[in-house]
Image: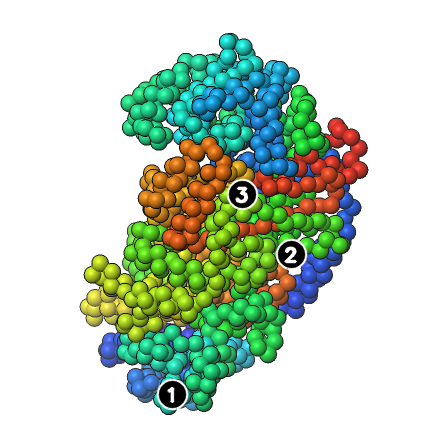
Amino acid sequence: MEEKNPFRNRGQFQAEKPSAETVGLVDRVPVHDEYLVGQQTAQTAPLPEELPSAFETATAHARTESRKNVTQTFWSLVRHQYKKNRVAVYALYLVYFLFAIAILADVLANDKPLYANYKGTTYFPVFKQYLADLRISAWSSDLVMADWKELEQSGAVTNAIWPPIRYSESDEDLANTLAAPSSAHLLGTDGIGRDVLAGMIHASRIALSIGFVSMSFAILIGVVLGALAGFYGGWVDSLISRLIEVVLTLPTFFLIIAVVAMVQQGSVWLIMVLIGLTSWPGIARFTRGEFLRIRNMEFVTAASALGLKNSRIIMRHVLPNSLAPVLITAAFGIAGAILIEAGLSFLGFGVPPTVVTWGSVLNDARNDIHAWWLAVFPGFAIFLAVVAYNLVGDGLRDALDPRLRD
Amino acid sequence: MNVRAPFCGSYATFLALFMRQYIPSIFCLSFLSCVLFAGCSGSERPISTDNRVIEWELSDADALNPYNATSANALDVYEQIFQRLLTIDVHTMQYTVPILATSMPVESPDHLQYDFTLRKDIKWADGTPFTGADVIFSLKALKNPFNTMSAQNRIVVDAIHSAELIDGDPYRVRFTLWKPYFLVMQATFGDGLYILPKHIFDPTGLTDKYSWNDLAALIEASGDQPADSATLAAHKNPAMIEFATWFTDAARNRDPKYIQGTGPYKLESWVTGQYTRLVRNPYYVNHWGPDFAANPDTMLYKTINDFNAAATALKSHDVDLIGFIQPQYWVDIDTNHSGLKRTAFPLGQFSYIGFNEKSPIFRDPGVRWAMAYMVDRKTIIDKLLFGMARLTESPVWSAHPEYNGDLPIIPYDPARAAHILDSLDWKDHDGDGIRDKVIDGKRIPFRFTFTVNAGNETRKKELLIIAEALRKIGIDASVNTLEWSVYLERLRDHLLEAHLGGWINNPFESDEYQLYHSSQAKNRGSNYDNYHNPRADSLMVAIRLEFDPQKRIVMEKELQKIFYDDQTSLFLWEPLNTAAWLDRFDNVSWNGYRPGYDAATWKIRGANGGGMKATF
């Protein structure tokens, strides 16, 4: 059973081959990416060819296994395991889908057309706006504050191709405030006539970036502190472990509310940083645990026997082998961060009023109780995103667990 | 060790584990609870006949000592506890009802002396008779400059020099003024100068140890304005300081032992964040007619610090009366079936957007005019206030004779606004979609922030509508919310670039000095936007010294025209006060004197006499 543990095999392989030293963290990052983004990259190619020699040190059973699957890497094994969990696979598709919406938000919902012909000139207003925002291009004086819908109605603009939703997130249709879902507004409008669907599409950017940015913060802090604690042990470990315990006792949500209340101009970035600063202890604990386990393995001993510096052992030998639990925690953490942000926006803290988030639409529902569409759709979006990330985390955990492997 | 360690780090993990196995049960449970809650809210509850009124308050009073309290919630409560020398007749809105005096005062021709004769049949809530000594004590207590809590309330007695017994008669009091003040009858005797019991608030006679001249010395030293801290430090009067310390102590602001007056009720208990409870004053006798009756045994002020929750509490009969319910809940009330009633009436408020004239953008009145053309007030009133407001172009209450109704209402006209901005060279010179202009050698983009108090969703939405309209003509306006006390602090420091606010006008003739005189732009005064116009300044001073009402009206109208031409503030509308109550009262009446009602005069239908205690 132990011998089947890919961690061990990988570890021994690295320790025995001096060339493993060159297979550093930089090389291995694309392997992670390959799993996450689904792209095969050139750097991953040398590894499989070297695998058989690694398996030679393992049992005979493992040897036969490795011959059957010559191209197997650790992550391809994980992917294989992950795919067995159908729910988790669909959840991953859902995450991809949310990302697609977030990236394409401006193309999906905008008050400018994608393509238009104005006075004989062809424009791509949505894309031109990007260039104008980047100061690469500028609008001519007659178009800079133009209302494209009016221009089309007056006949000045022809052949316009519009995004599926003809409203931006801040665009107000004051004639139709609190309108129920209809063909004009697929998911209805809020109290000041903003299209709920347009708002939710643009808000998906905030929801997803909150999750990723805050978890990046948390991983950065958690991995560094956890690695130091686990690798060095002793008083460093005691100190960091106590720090972890202290931060774990903080009531995260109320701490964030208190800080946000003190800061006079709230922003999405502040929320991201605050969530990151309070959610690292879990990651630090797992990293520390993994480090404690791995630092006593033979390949680490071998590496120190070869006279490598501690920093090199940590970065190139121990850290890459201890990232799996961090990944799982991060997937759950993203879901948690999305929930925290939705909760803050619902309570009216955090993001400025001009920014639409799923939680702020929910908050509007609180003021206009009949407007069920203000509660149901963003509520469902939050539910979907949180469940998707949780299921992905769940699937990852199962896929990474050697004991569940058949 | 392996990776399947328990995931204690995140509750989301727990949620996921939980959900995977129990999704069907979650759905069943939520469905069940929906049905249950729907059942609860739909059920008809019998209407209580308890002889008590439960009024809703958004937050606790800051204090119940009328000199130390500044919040409107406090006013609702202490109005039932303390009385004044005279008060307003809510039917005529004139200050013509003597309360603690037998008649209106005798005024000297130079408007510098006012002689009151006091009632001999009034007793404090502990049975001690009321005398002129209490009146003199009250004025001395309020004028004590070492009491920083009462600075705001002290303004109404700034014009008064002293109060003395006439020929030693304990029931005749003479007030002497420094200089004439045309609102002394309304603002001072009829409004701010509540009479407090001397034997309770000053048992050791500390106020006897400082004289009117001691007080005058402090005021003279700093001229017309209230004394500043340096002057106070130089005049160490031990008795005055000792009294101020004693008077501002928490006990004097909220202890039932101290909070008792000559009014119909006395404080029984105050549980912070929950309720304030008043019971009848056993020594109160109504000499003044039905407008001063005390029908309920108990007046209970329940604190629910959320508008939405308050509306729900009313619907579930947990409160009897909401003096101000937000329009979106007000329009929601089904008066046919819910056992609720509602009304809307003017109460002298006005809303405005202030643009700080220290800001280089808003220094120019032309820009403020362009802003005025950019606010679609009709749509906002329709959509957000549900029609519960009236357009205005003036800070004066439109019900008053001095209101200038000749000022044309400024329409929503983005083209006109854009034209004005273009003519002032506020154009988009750099093609980034935002107007800009070179001011004092620097290119300034037209970018600013509106600030509003957090929690007021209606105001926030109003600003979002305006900001979106501005965005379309190339002005980048963002909206920021600040917690109420922080918002007030920033306003008083004159630091907000643009803000949406409101004022409640007094029921008496308007005096714009507090809001728009240039002297009030300093020292944390109420001229929040640093408005400054020498002509307006001199008019505001002249109005305060003019005793001919007709001449004052002419001057007041001219002043409003100046405000209009300058667009001093972007005056928006006068909102109606929307109120709702549980239909268990007779004799319900509403008036224009804040808070717009006196629930003590209402009669509880079916109440079986007095003596019945509310069970709360």
Q: At label 1, which amino acid type do we have? A: Lys
Q: Nearer the viewer, residue B487 or B246?
A: B487
Sequence-wise, which precedes: disc 3 or disc 2? 2
Left or right: B331 as drawn, with respect to A260: right
Task: State which mark lies toward you, 3 or 2.
Answer: 3
Q: Position of residue B180 (x, y in %)?
A: 43, 27
Distance from the alpha carbon under mark 1 to that under mark 3: 57 Å
Work out whether disc 3 and disc 2 sit on a shared chain. Answer: yes
Q: Position of residue A177 (x, y in %)?
A: 57, 67
Mark yes or no: residue A27 visible. Answer: no
Q: Which residue is mark 2?
A: B331
Question: Which residue: 52% across, 16% down?
Answer: B173
Q: Position of residue A316 (x, y in %)?
A: 27, 71
Q: Is residue B214 above or below residue A86?
A: above
Q: Which mark is residue B359?
A: none
Task: State which mark lies toward you, 1 or 3.
Answer: 3
Q: Chain of mark 1?
A: A
Q: At label 3, which amino acid type do we have? A: Pro
Q: At label 2, which amino acid type do we have? A: Val
Question: Which residue: 63% across, 31% down?
Answer: B278
Q: Secondary structure at mark 1?
A: loop
Q: Which mark is residue B401?
A: 3
Q: Which residue is mark 1?
A: A119
Distance from the alpha carbon under mark 3 to that under mark 2: 31 Å
Question: Which residue: 58% across, 34% down?
Answer: B94
